[in-house]
Image (cartoon, rainbow, N blue to C red):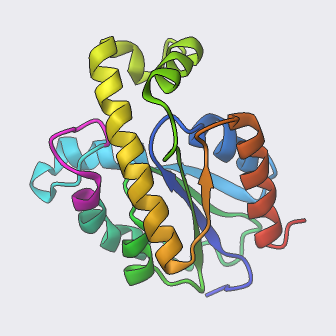
Amino acid sequence: MNIEKKHIIVSGVPRTGKTLSICKTLAETGHYQHVMMDSITQSFEYIFPELEIFDGKTWNVRMQKVSEKLIDFLAHLVHTEKYDDLEYRMLIDMYQLMPEDYVRKINKECCKAYFVGYPNANIEEKFRKIRKNETKWDWTRKVNDNELKEKIKVYIQESQLIQSQCEKYNLPFFDFSNNIDKSTDNIVKYILKDNNYM
């Protein structure tokens, strides 16, 4: 296993800009292959529902439970040696990972994790920003205003839980409650420097 170059995970609640800002920017450096875990979890949910590995939009199942069920798959995925002779590594973009499961199961010699959220966001302000910036592809367009506000409330609670676990295990957490552009720039620079690309 090549431990000089590590795979990375960027995990946190939806609508932080993980996919189109953080991961897109990191992938464009050429150091990482962007892997969108949503596609994998949606496939699990559709083909193997008995595994109870559900996509983030299945709201009757809490994120922590999905993380517990997904972690063994994720641990095996990042432990692969198939990337050893390649210049790039995997960049796993996901929602369904709790810091405690990362600490418990992932080999730190081959994979680092970085967590994002908005633990201090105001529900109404976050709602307005989402509506203002959503595109025709965003799932938020398919939910009504009250449902979206309820989801934001859950995301804030989950962000607080993720942040507290990151503090407990000394893992990097980036607060996207305000100024998303600055927060995106900060995490991208941090990850590149942390992996010796700057």
Locate the C terminus and report the quarter of the image it occupies: bottom right
Residue beneath the point at 39% across and 23% down: 139
State whether the magenta stretch is mostly helix, strand or loop.
Answer: loop
Region rendered in magenta: 56-66
Q: Which image quadrant for residue 182? A: top right
**Residue 89 horizontal/vertical position (percent):** 66, 65
Residue beneath the point at 43% across and 28% down: 123
Q: Which image quadrant for residue 174? A: bottom right
Please state which of residues 136 and 127 is positioned toward the viewer in this rendering. 127
**Residue 29 horizontal/vertical position (percent):** 81, 51
Tell me: residue 98, above or below residue 154: below
Tell me: residue 46, above or below residue 125: below
Tell me: residue 88, above or below residue 63: below
Residue beneath the point at 20% across and 41% down: 46
Please state which of residues 29 and 133 is positioned toward the viewer in this rendering. 133
**Residue 156 horizontal/vertical position (percent):** 41, 42
Locate residue 57 relative to residue 152 in the image: left or right: left
Tell me: residue 162, above or below residue 151: below
The residue most toward the left is: 50
**Residue 49 horizontal/vertical position (percent):** 13, 49
